[in-house]
């Protein structure tokens, strides 16, 4: 007999297999139906009783500090208060709850300082979430949380979040930038360093029952938020304020249609001490339009698309950092680049003479000097001081397009500077292969290539710092929430463009400009300053040539530059437009304010000191008119008391006093000399001290190296003690100290 299955056996076996399969299928089908239909409500309840509620904990955003750890931007924890109206109804209907809706509404309205009707309306909505108020400070949120806990009102929700505060309001606005409504940076440092500043959000996972109530002692997980890192800037509030104050003075007087901008930096390291665009804006309220003219125009417009567009345009302008995001013709400030390139290549020497001729023709195109009289043949020193265009066209010709473009590129004008801010643009320039003699001529005096202010000051820094092109940097270091340094940002030197010798020669030339031209430059008695003004025509926008950018770039001390600043005024109105008129005075204002602060004090020559103080001549017994003439010739004012013909007594009669002091001449024998009580002038500025003494009929003689420095304060060493009764006209001398020293 064979062991092979017969066909009948095969049929029986398959019948059994089918039967088993059928049972399994039927069972599975039944289970599915039971789960999904028959027991649905039971399973749903089970699931919902173990729901997890996830709450995001916003990471605290890092702080932005100035170079002295003064806070420029800081985040504070605030709360959003909300209500779950459905749950609130349930809470109030609980047996043990003794509250009415009106009690809850009035508590919320009182604490949040809101309209009770508005809150009630939200509490009566038929949904699960109604926001009541954002940015509620912790103390108020605590009151509401305590009230909710005491009364078992799980429907009241306080969610923690973070709010950005800018304690200095508009200071350095275009540098710091502001946040998007959703909390990330969209402008300035807030955007550029967003990854560092923002940190990592955390969350809590809380098990809740099917009514949304937390299950105590049950499943709860907490993922801590990692706070953001903080920035410590090179930017200094004191220097920034000095720059912004000067720019405001400038804007008030010259009303530029396209704003003014300024940068102050360390030419050796690229550390940016200050950067501003006027008008700035309030970082705590970026939507407020700060240009008063624009604001008035927009307010007068009827609501509609046109008004919305005008607003958007105004915002885009005021939020834009002019120093790095707009390009302009640098004009004659650029002559420092042309001159240093030619000196470095030895295509010229500084003592060589360059002609003016008022007009100079290049390939049949006439170029004019700004001056209407011929500057004649000038050395490089005088050509720079005269800012003579034909002279610089001639210097440019010695370079030819190849070398001109080589240095244009080496000085960093064909690339962005790489400053640590967003939205930096680069220059618009004629490349070597498109540069004919006419383009070379106009490029040589800064009227063809358009650059940013940050490119210009960075290249100028290289001209005077020994030849090194540095990267400008706003941030000095990044620290974590415990103060540990995460990243120390070292100065970056990209390359050496010109030699130390050429650079030293350029410093000398630029100091010569300020020393010899004085007016229209950043000349400050007692200081060694180098500088150059520029006035360009915005010929691409206004071919008539009557729209200008006036600028000035200065550095100090001229022999060892520690600080450099550039101010550019775009389309000034009110008649003046030369850089020497609209920018230089404000560059001077900034330097006067910041040099002593930076520890750079004036050193007066004997000649300069003589300008300030005068030796009083005794004119007693002289004819009154002669005495008057003698004293007035010394720069003194004279008060004559009495009707006599000759001087009987003079106060003060000897010693030194400040030029401009008042000398009293008594002309009658028995005249009673007037007396006065000496006030205290300690701690006053020069102007305040002078006013106070003048009011008492006295004269001031300030001393000390800071005597004529803006912001310097009088010490306690006044030569006549306060309260002493002296003759009117007496000179009170006192030493002045830089305000930064006396305040320390
Ligand atoms: Zn000239």
Image (spheres, grey):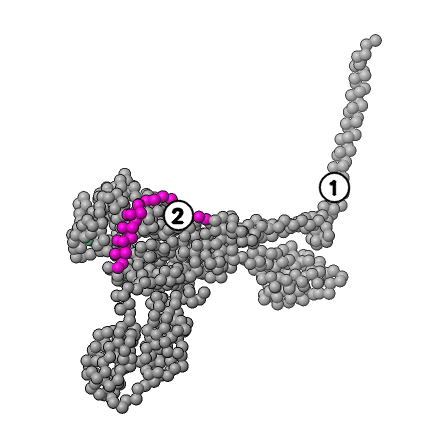
Earlier residue among tags 2 and 1 = 1
Q: Which residues are magenta?
A: 489-515
Residue matched to label 2: 471
Mark 2: give few (<14), some (14-19) or many (20+) Cα within 10 Å. Answer: many
Q: Is residue 496 magenta?
A: yes
Residue drawn at x 35%, y 61% as measured from the top left: 591
Mark linked to residue 374: none
Residue placed at 21% from the left, 77% from the top?
A: 630
Q: Is residue 153 left or right of residue 732?
A: right
State whether label 2 is within 8 Å of ligand 1. no
Q: Position of residue 502 (x, y in %)?
A: 28, 47
Front position in the image: 180 or 647: 647
Please, what secondary structure does the residue beneath circle 1 have?
helix
Please tell me which residue is depicted at 45% across the width and 65% down the height of the picture: 744
Residue closest to the eye, 735 or 41: 735
SS type, badge 2: loop
Count of numbered marks: 2
- Place of residue 691 in the rendered image (x, y in percent of width and height, measured from the top left): 35, 76
Q: Is residue 366 visible?
A: no
Residue ID for mark 1: 37
């Amino acid at each position: 007999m064979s062991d092979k299955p017969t066909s009948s056996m095969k049929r029986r076996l398959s019948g059994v297999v089918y039967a088993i399969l059928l049972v399994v299928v039927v069972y599975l089908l039944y289970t599915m139906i039971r789960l999904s239909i028959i027991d649905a409500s039971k399973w749903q309840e089970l699931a919902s009783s173990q729901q997890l509620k996830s709450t995001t904990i916003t990471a605290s955003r890092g702080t932005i500090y100035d170079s002295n750890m003064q806070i420029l931007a800081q985040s504070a924890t605030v709360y959003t208060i909300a209500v779950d109206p459905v749950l609130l109804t349930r809470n109030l209907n609980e047996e043990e709850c003794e509250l009415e809706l009106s009690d809850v509404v009035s508590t919320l309205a009182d604490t949040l300082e809101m309209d009770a009707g508005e809150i009630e309306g939200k509490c009566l909505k038929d949904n699960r979430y109604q926001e009541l108020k954002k940015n509620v400070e912790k103390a108020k949120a605590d009151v509401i949380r305590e009230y909710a806990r005491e009364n078992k009102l799980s429907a009241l929700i306080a969610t923690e979040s973070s709010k950005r505060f800018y304690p200095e309001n508009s200071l350095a606005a275009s540098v710091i930038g502001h946040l998007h409504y959703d909390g990330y940076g969209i402008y300035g440092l807030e955007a550029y360093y967003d990854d560092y500043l923002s940190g990592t959000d955390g969350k809590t996972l809380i098990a809740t029952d099917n009514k949304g109530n937390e299950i105590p002692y049950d499943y709860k997980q907490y993922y801590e938020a990692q706070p953001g890192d903080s920035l410590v800037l090179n930017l200094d509030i004191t220097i920034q304020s000095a720059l912004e104050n000067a720019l405001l003075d400038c804007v008030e007087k010259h009303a530029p249609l396209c704003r003014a901008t300024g940068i102050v930096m360390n030419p050796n390291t690229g550390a940016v001490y200050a950067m501003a665009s006027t008008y700035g804006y309030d970082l705590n309220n970026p939507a407020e339009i700060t240009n008063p003219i624009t604001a008035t125009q927009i307010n007068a417009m009827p609501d509609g698309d046109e008004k919305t567009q005008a607003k958007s345009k105004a915002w885009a302008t005021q939020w834009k950092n002019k120093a790095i995001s707009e390009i302009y013709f640098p004009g004659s400030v650029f002559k420092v680049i042309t001159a240093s390139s030619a000196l470095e290549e030895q295509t010229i020497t500084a003592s060589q003479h360059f002609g003016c001729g008022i007009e100079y023709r290049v390939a049949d195109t006439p170029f004019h000097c700004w001056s209407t009289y011929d500057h004649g043949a000038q050395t490089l020193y005088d050509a720079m001081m005269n800012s003579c265009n034909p002279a610089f066209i001639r210097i440019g010709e010695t370079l030819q397009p190849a070398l001109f473009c080589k240095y244009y590129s080496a000085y960093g004008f064909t690339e962005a500077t790489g400053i640590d801010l967003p939205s930096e643009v680069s220059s618009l320039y004629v490349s070597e292969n498109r540069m004919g003699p006419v383009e070379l001529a106009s490029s040589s005096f800064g009227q063809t290539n358009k650059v940013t202010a940050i490119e210009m000051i960075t290249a100028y820094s290289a001209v005077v710092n020994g030849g090194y092109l540095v990267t400008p940097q706003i941030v000095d270091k990044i620290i974590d929430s415990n103060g540990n340094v995460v990243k120390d940002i070292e100065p970056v030197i990209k390359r050496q463009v010109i030699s130390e010798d050429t650079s030293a020669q350029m410093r000398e030339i630029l100091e010569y400009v300020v020393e010899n031209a004085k007016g229209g430059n950043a000349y400050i008695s007692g200081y060694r300053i180098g500088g150059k003004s520029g006035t360009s025509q915005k010929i691409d926008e206004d071919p008539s040539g009557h729209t200008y950018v006036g600028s000035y770039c200065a550095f100090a001390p001229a022999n060892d530059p520690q600080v450099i600043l550039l101010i550019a005024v775009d389309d000034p109105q009110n008649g003046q437009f030369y850089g020497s008129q609209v920018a230089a005075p404000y560059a001077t204002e900034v330097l006067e304010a910041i040099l002593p602060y930076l520890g750079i004090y004036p050193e007066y020559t004997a000649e300069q000191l003589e300008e300030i103080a005068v030796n009083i001549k005794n004119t007693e017994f002289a004819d009154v008119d002669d005495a008057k003439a003698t004293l007035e010739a010394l720069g003194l004012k004279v008060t004559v008391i009495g009707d006599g013909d000759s001087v009987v007594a003079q106060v003060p009669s000897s010693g030194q006093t400040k030029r401009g002091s008042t000398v009293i001449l008594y002309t009658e024998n028995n005249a009673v000399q007037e007396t006065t009580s000496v006030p205290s002038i300690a701690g006053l500025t020069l102007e305040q001290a002078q006013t106070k003494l003048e009011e008492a009929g006295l004269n001031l003689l300030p001393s000390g190296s800071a005597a004529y420095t803006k912001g310097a304060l009088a010490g306690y060493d006044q030569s006549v003690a306060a309260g002493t009764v002296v003759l009117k006209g007496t000179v009170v001398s006192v030493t002045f100290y830089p305000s930064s020293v006396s305040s320390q």
